[in-house]
Image: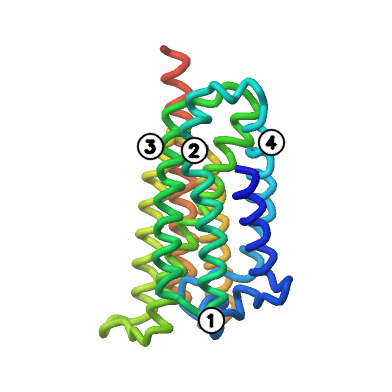
Amino acid sequence: MLVCLLLALAGDAIGSGAFGGTPIQHAAGGALSATATMIAPAVPAFSIWAVIYLALIGYTVVQFLPSRKADAKHRALGYPMAASLLLNAAWILSVQAGMLTLSVIVIALLLAALALAFVIVARHPATGILDAVFVDGAAGLYLGWVCVATAADIAAALTAAGFDGGGIAADAWGCAVLVAVGLVGVGLALFGRGRLAPAASLVWGIAWVAVERSSGAPRSTAVAVTAVAVAVVIVVATVLTRVLTMRRGRRG
């Protein structure tokens, strides 16, 4: 796990422009810049990676605790989390190489690995504050953000390949994709019994889409309003599910 984390951190450093790498927003001809597609979030949205990596560092430390070595949850979770770190580094390298089609395949695998991690987390409730913050929290934050990133990456790859919407306006495509992401967010809220971490990173990413579409280019009031509405729905679904789950637990 430690080696995978170090590789992921090295990949992130390259993706930020260090070690001769090109910042992700400028790589692949700017296909992933904030102005490339209707669902690209504003640049400040990517600051969430600092929080995600801090959580992942905490998760790695927790994994080394003697009490976790024989824990079934941690043994099962280690594999998809380690795979996610390697895939994250691979995604950055594929974008750096301008291979957007490959990047879509890689991020789809990354999303699948994190979905599996979330299933494991949801089936094994946290046993303490360390688990809640650095295990469940890390997996949830990571998954929520990658849901947004996957949609943005697919849109970027299609746009770069020359897809013109098939006769459907870009605004309509943007709204439709955001609604799909919102449905995923509601699904995560229900399946995760109102876990806050995935909702937080999902809403963060979607909110920055709203900011970019309302103040940047391409500007779209429809997409911005839809993004706000989707973010609100995710928050409401998560809070309501969490409250209902807590009430059932007290009755039980």
Residue 34 percent location from the top left of the image: 57, 76
Q: Is residue 69 above or below residue 225?
A: above
Residue wearing tag 1: 28
Q: Which amino acid does the dot numbered 1 rest on?
A: Ala
**Which sits earlier in the primary sequence, circle 4 or circle 3?**
4
Question: Residue 2: in sight, yes or no?
Answer: yes
Label 3: element kind: helix
**Residue type at numbered disc 3:** Phe
Mark 1 and mark 2: Cα distance apart in space:
39 Å
Name the residue that disc number 3 marks.
191
Q: Answer above or below: position of 62 versus 231.
A: above
The spot of residue 213 in percent (x, y) is 53, 74
Residue type highlighted by circle 2: Val
Q: Is residue 250 above or below residue 140?
A: above
First in residue order: circle 2 vs circle 3: 3
Given the image, on which type of amino acid does mark 4 rest?
Answer: Val
Name the residue nearer the viewer: 11 or 49: 11
Q: How many C-alpha atoms fall within 10 Å of the one at disc 3: few (<14), some, or many (≥20)? A: some
- The answer to whether residue 219 is seen in the rendering is no
Q: Residue at x 26, y 83 (%)?
A: 166
Residue 102 sits in which quadrant? bottom left
- Label 2, on which residue? 239
CB-based contact (under 8 Å), mark 4 and mark 1: no
Classify 10 Å Cα crowding around label 4: few (below 14), some (14-19), many (20 and above).
few
Give the number of callouts. 4
Q: Which residue is mark 4?
A: 61
Separation of residues labelled 2 and 3 (CA atoms): 13 Å
Residue mark closest to the camera, 1 vs 2? 1
